[in-house]
Image (cartoon, rainbow, N blue to C red):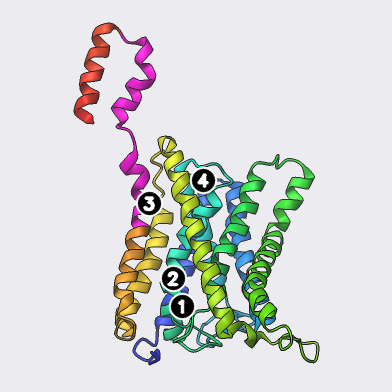
Amino acid sequence: MEIIQTLHPNLYLIFEVLGLVSFVAILAREIYQKNEFRIYEILSALVFGLILEIGNTYLGHTYSYSSNFLIQIFNVPLAIGVYWALIIYSAMLLSDQYHLPWTLRPFMDALTAIILDLYLDVVAVRLGFWRWVIPHNQEWYGIPFDNLAGWIFVVIAFSFIIRFIRTLNLKRTLSRIILLLSPFLAYGGLMILLALYGLLSFLPYALNNWGTWVISDFKPNINVFYNPEIQLWKIIIFVALLVELVNIVVGAMIKYRKKYVWRFDLLSFSILTSMHAFILITLFTSGTYKELPIFIFLGTSFFIIHLFLHFLPHMLQEPKVYYFFKHVEKTLSKEEKIVAKMLDKELR
């Protein structure tokens, strides 16, 4: 059964307005705080989002967007680029709270994004926001596994480039050139990662069917990637990728847990929470939950994980009074140390 969006004619407009308002709010915050390079980062994320969507729709021809969106650029809704910027930038603000090494933060950014997409895409295709070439009962409830892997690669590619640029001396000409080219460098990295994923998925099929997969008319047949054998390998590789992503993030969170600092970013939290809330609300109001009741559980679980990732630093943070005494202990008298230890015991 396919859910056709008829009950909420203004849902597309709500989706676009929610994204644009959120984008303006976070951009205005960075302008107000005069964070010059952060302003560029969010604008760069917007450019990157549009580049990857325009490139993927024209190169892959595996999905297309509804014409109901108000503002479109080369048949790609502006709101989609905006949401890519919001998701990536908000995820980066979240991982910054954990004080992980910069090389590990892109993996946490990707985890934050994929727990959103695991039910965003499923609901969106049933609302008619976009349409894939496969039926709703194939792969991940109508979403190709290579798209799910793509979400991980998109965020890792952009986050890694931006975080690397942050380590450079931005007064140098070369650093500024890299900064300006960051959306294109990230897109190049994304293409490499997607090509490796496709190659690993296709290779077992090619070896087993080497006589039949020859390209005809010098044009690759994209439908071969939805062959059941290749679909199986796409699932296996995606699950392995997701497990390793969780392993890296959880391992880093455990290893560096003593460095967490409670720097709650209300705006990025509100943006990501509003996205989760929008999906959950439309899951029920559109009737999608009747077709896929399992997403009542999955959607709720993903939302809880989202909240957990935001509030974990606070839950593990040392009491402020103890943190203060810990750093001034050498200056305290013997009696003051006794009082400090008693207070620490009560707080703990």
Q: Which mark is residue 140?
A: 1
Q: Residue at x 68, y 81 (%)?
A: 58
Picture coordinates of residue 284, whole percent (x, y): 29, 79
Image height check: is 20 above or below 67? Answer: above
The residue identified by callout 4 is 33
Inspect this view and state whether residue 31 appears. no
Between discs 2 and 1, the one toward the N terminus: 2
Where does the N terminus fall, quadrant-wise? bottom left
Say left or right for 235 vs 195.
left
Please tell me how crowded label 2 is: few (under 14), some (14-19), or many (20+) other residues with Cα within 10 Å: some
Asked if the residue at tag 4 contacts the one at tag 2, i.e. Cβ–Cβ closer than 8 Å, the answer is: no
Inspect this view and state whether residue 336 appears. yes
Q: Nearer the viewer, mark 4 or mark 3?
A: 3
Span of residues in magenta: 306-332
Picture coordinates of residue 40, whole percent (x, y): 62, 54
Asked if the residue at tag 1 contacts the one at tag 2, i.e. Cβ–Cβ closer than 8 Å, the answer is: yes
Circle 3: residue type: His
* Residue at mark 4 to residue at mark 3: CA–CA distance: 22 Å
**In the rendered picture of this protein, how many numbered marks are placed on residues?**
4
Q: Nearer the viewer, mark 4 or mark 1?
A: 1
SS at badge 4: loop
Main SS of the magenta segment? helix
The residue identified by callout 3 is 310
SS at badge 1: loop
The residue identified by callout 2 is 118
